[in-house]
Image (cartoon, grey):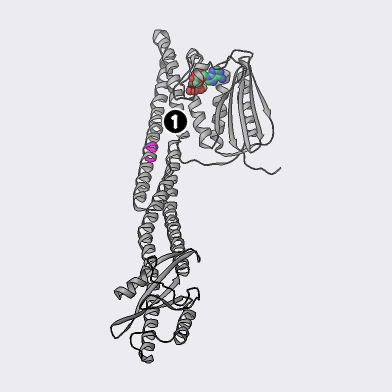
């Protein structure tokens, strides 16, 4: 699972847990509060009604019995209308005196066992509050029954019944609002996590890219030191490491360049002395001639090392290079020498490929490839230098009709100092030629490869520079 997915999941889990921990008790309290508030209101109504009935009893001047039905009916209807409640009043014996609904017959006995609320009010003199499901209305009813008291005697009971659907709807709406709020909090939590992750993820990807580039030899690869503290430190140490690597590569290259340069002077001196000895003739002269051959090899090696050091140098000048013209010049340089050993060097120039590179580097590439092609193939061989433009690419190839490079050597010929069987047979050479070629091509953004061919075909592909025609 990706870092981002983990972080988002953690944020989701955490915010959901917090929301649930807070919202569930809150929702329960809201429900309970609404119920008890409603109960208090109905209870208040019932108490007021009971008090009014009790007042009527006093006013009627008939202690111990309820006022005449007509007067009772009026306040019962009034109370029922204001709150949409049903009001039933019974006398001390539990017989109905008034019913706002009109369903209960006057005089009917109402304090039955199915209506324990009346029994509690009438016979125990206490206020009774309960809920009961009404089949006719299809909802829970809140029943509040209050005794009507005259001079400490229970003279009757008042029962208010009120529907609870409205309260329930209200509670459900509050719950819905809470749930919506919770969802918003969870989404906000995930969004914040995403916002926090973005710079983090970006920096990690940058570091990964930079280390890949460094591994591919782009020693100037660095990452900006930004983002969270830990990643800033990591970026800092990465940059330090890249700088160290770059520095040590550069130092190594300088060392090779200096060493080979320093070696050249004594080699020249040595050559002059050997020539002098050779001039004297005799046995010493013969030995000197052989030593001179060894000296040739040593000189080539020093030259190649110097070229390689230059190829890997970090600084160098570049300009647009006309590949076709460059190939033409190279063929011109080699044609005569090749003809002397019975070989031909041909040019196949197509398109108008230009590349951004150092001219000398590319000339060196051509020289090395043509040198190989001529050196490792028998008389009668044709060496062809091809240039072309293909789509966005500039294309260069040196092809020969010689024996080719055997499969076991193919993978290794670009290594430094590696010489194939044909190379070892030929004697002269250091095994640095193709390594130098690859360095030069890579440095100018190109790619080099051995293509399948009857002989040898070495191809280099560069990004083409747009040219005016
Ligand atoms: N055109 C070719 N035909 C056959 N074999 C080749 C060809 N080019 C290269 N090789 C093989 O690849 C090996 C490596 O070539 P590379 O140019 O790197 O070194 P070299 O030619 O041996 O020495 P240097 O070029 O440094 O004098 C050679 O020794 C040879 O065996
Ligand atoms: Mg070579």
Local SS, label 1: helix
The residue under the point 62% across, 32% down is 395
Q: Locate the C terminus by quadrant.
A: top right
Report the label total.
1
Q: Locate the N terminus by quadrant.
A: top left
Q: Position of residue 4 (x, y in %)?
A: 43, 47
Q: Position of residue 11 (x, y in %)?
A: 40, 53
| Residue 125 in view, yes or no | yes
The residue under the point 55% across, 32% down is 447
Residue stretch rendered in magenta on the structure: 246-251
Q: Position of residue 425 (x, y in %)?
A: 49, 12
Q: Main secondary structure of the magenta part?
A: helix
The residue under the point 44% across, 25% down is 416
Please say whether residue 82 is one of the residues in the magenta stretch.
Answer: no
Direction from residue 342 to residue 231 in the image, left or right: left
Of all residues, the one furthest to the right in this rendering is 469
Q: Is residue 304 above or below residue 381?
A: below
Direction from residue 152 to residue 131 in the image, left or right: right
Along the viewing direction, whichever of 397 and 45 lies nearer the viewer:
45
Q: Position of residue 178 (x, y in %)?
A: 43, 63
Dot 1 corresponds to which residue?
A: 306
Direction from residue 354 to residue 263 in the image, left or right: left
Is the CB of mark 1 within 8 Å of ligand 1?
no
Image-quadrant location for residue 454? top right
| Residue 225 in view, yes or no | no
Along the viewing direction, whichever of 309 and 262 lies nearer the viewer:
309
Of all residues, the one furthest to the left in this rendering is 152
């Amino acid at each position: 699972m990706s870092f981002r997915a983990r972080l988002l999941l953690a944020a989701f889990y955490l915010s959901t847990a917090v929301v649930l921990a807070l919202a569930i008790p809150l929702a329960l309290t809201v429900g309970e509060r609404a119920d008890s508030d409603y109960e208090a209101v109905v209870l208040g109504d019932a108490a007021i009604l009971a008090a009014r009935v009790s007042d009527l009893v006093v006013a009627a001047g008939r202690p111990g019995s309820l006022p005449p039905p007509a007067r009772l009916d009026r306040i019962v209807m009034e109370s029922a209308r204001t709150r949409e409640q049903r009001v039933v009043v019974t006398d001390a014996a539990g017989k109905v005196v008034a019913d706002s609904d009109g369903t209960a017959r006057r005089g009917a006995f109402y304090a039955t066992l199915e209506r324990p609320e009346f029994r509690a009010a009438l016979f125990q003199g206490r206020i009774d509050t309960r809920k009961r499901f009404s089949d006719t209305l299809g909802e829970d009813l809140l029943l509040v029954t209050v005794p009507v008291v005259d001079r400490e005697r229970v003279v009757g009971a008042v029962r208010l019944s009120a529907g609870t659907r409205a309260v329930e709807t209200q509670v459900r709406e509050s719950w819905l609002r809470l749930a919506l709020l919770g969802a918003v909090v969870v989404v906000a939590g995930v969004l914040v996590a995403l916002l926090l992750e973005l710079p983090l993820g970006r920096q990690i990807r940058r570091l990964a890219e930079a280390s890949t580039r460094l591994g591919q030899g782009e020693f100037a690869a660095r990452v900006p030191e930004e983002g969270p503290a830990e990643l800033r430190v990591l970026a800092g140490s990465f940059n330090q490491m890249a700088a160290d690597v770059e520095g040590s590569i550069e130092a190594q290259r300088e060392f090779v360049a200096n060493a080979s340069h320093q070696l050249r002077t004594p080699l020249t001196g040595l050559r002059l002395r050997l020539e002098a000895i050779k001039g004297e003739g005799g046995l010493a002269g013969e030995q000197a001639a052989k030593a001179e051959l060894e000296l040739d090899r040593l000189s080539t090696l020093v030259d190649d090392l110097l070229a390689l050091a230059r190829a890997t140098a970090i600084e160098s000048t570049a300009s647009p290079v006309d590949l076709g013209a460059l190939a033409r010049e190279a063929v011109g340089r080699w044609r005569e020498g090749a003809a002397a050993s019975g070989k031909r060097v041909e040019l196949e120039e197509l398109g108008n490929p230009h590349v951004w590179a150092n001219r000398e580097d590319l000339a060196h590439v051509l020289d090395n490839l043509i040198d190989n092609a001529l050196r490792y193939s028998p008389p009668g061989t044709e060496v062809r230098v091809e240039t072309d433009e293909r789509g966005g690419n500039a294309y260069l190839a040196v092809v020969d009709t010689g024996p080719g490079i055997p499969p076991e050597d193919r993978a290794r010929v670009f290594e430094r100092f590696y010489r194939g069987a044909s190379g070892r047979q030929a004697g002269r050479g250091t095994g640095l030629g193709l390594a130098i070629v690859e360095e030069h091509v890579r440095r100018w953004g190109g790619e080099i490869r051995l293509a399948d061919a009857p002989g040898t075909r070495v191809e280099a592909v560069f990004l083409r520079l747009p040219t005016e025609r």
